Amino acid sequence: MAAPREPYASDPDGSRGRLFDEPPSKTRSAFRRDCDRVIHSTAFRRLKHKTQVFVYHEGDHYRTRLTHTLEVAQIARALARQLGLDEDLTEALALAHDLGHPPFGHAGERALDACLDAFGGFDHNAQTLRVVTLLERRYPDFDGLNLTWETLEGIVKHNGPLTDRAGDAVGRYQRRGIPVGIADFNRTCDLELWSFASLEAQVAAIADDIAYDAHDIDDGLRAGLFAVDDLKAMPLTAAMITEIARRHPRLDDVRRGAELVRELISYLIMAVVSEAAGRLADARPGSVDEVRRHRRALVAFPPEAAEAEALIKAFLKQRMYRHPRVMRVMDEAETIVRDLFARYRDDPAALPAEWLPEGGDSRALDAETARRIGNFIAGMTDRFAITEHRRLFDSTPELR
């Protein structure tokens, strides 16, 4: 296999390996193999009918988790190519990053988190790890996909370290501690939770931000939640809209919006490449392990782009995610998830046989039973959750 272009890139020939030994592929690198396993997984196919912002039946032209994931992968590969990183590992991480999301997007995650509060809550990164190490059952010798250490590390740590050197939780994990699924797995396979992840993982994480910003603008425009000219409220997009008008003075609003999205993606990609190049030049890491041990992330937005990106997120939060139309549907979606959890909790026999707790129809809601219920619901698509709710309840929200 060809070595990565840059010394700080992850090298598939130098991978720390897999939890279960397997002979290497004769035709694919270790990271390409990971990428292919994600693509062929059941969880990946289910993303087709999982909500990004709009529930799947609200329109064929809105993003789903699957189309969002493919767009993240495209942006991530573009960044990886510019920075001389391993594109296969980058793509694997981009394609895997949302495998643990439940139905109905963040509304479903909020509902499951509340239902599982007494048992450590619900964290979609921990659920993704659970999917690829346990819940996928496609191979004769192991559960999960048996991905490389580098891919598992990136799934868990793409947003940065989870602990300090002493093992104490940091950041958003300080209140509850490290999610159970990650903590349990880490005792078997040390993912070095105190360190940063590879540059490939950092690229996948920031590509997710870029895709969210640009494509949620596109979907918000398409849904009529706001207009192109409303985006003049932010300096960056205002300047882009003015320049588009100068170049194309007679452009209709649909094409103006599409051109704005393209301009925004290009700007953010080049901003990240420039900032990462500067940080790498200062840090001069000679290996991926030096990247992990560095005091800060090496892939990031420069200050001016970070400020512009934060304004875009604030705009979308107010004008899209909290729009009364979206909030009404998401409130009803949360009700579906909470109802399903309560029904399975009170009547485990309502679960499919393979999801029943060990020992059959136990009425005691212990941690294992609660987590089994959570795993089952998290794996549902939007439409299956709605169908299951209709099976178990007399009335089901329409989510429209």
Image (tube, rainbow, N blue to C red):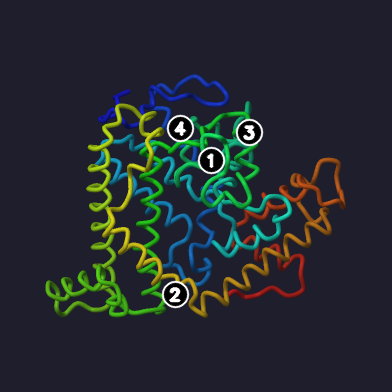
- Label located before the other in sequence (1 or 2): 1
- Label located before the other in sequence (4 or 1): 4
Q: Residue at x 47, y 24 (%)?
A: 16
Q: Residues within 10 Å of mark 3 (few under 14, many from 20)?
A: some
| Residue 257 versus residue 210 in the image, above or below | below
List x then y, in percent, for residue 92: 43, 40
| Residue occupied by mark 4 | 150
- Label located before the other in sequence (2 or 4): 4
List x then y, in percent, for residue 240: 21, 69
- Mark 2 to mark 4 CA distance (whole Å): 37 Å
Q: Quadrant of the N terminus?
A: top left
Q: Secondary structure at mark 1?
A: loop
- Mark 1 to mark 2 CA distance (whole Å): 32 Å
Question: What amino acid is found at the position of numbered circle 1 in the picture?
Answer: Thr
Question: What amino acid is found at the position of numbered circle 2 in the picture?
Answer: Gln
| Residue occupied by mark 2 | 318
Q: Residues within 10 Å of mark 4 (few under 14, many from 20)?
A: many
Q: Secondary structure at mark 2?
A: helix
* Picture quadrant of residue 29: top left
| Residue occupied by mark 1 | 163
Disc 4, disc 1: CB below 8 Å?
Answer: no
- Mark 4 to mark 1 CA distance (whole Å): 18 Å
| Residue occupied by mark 3 | 143
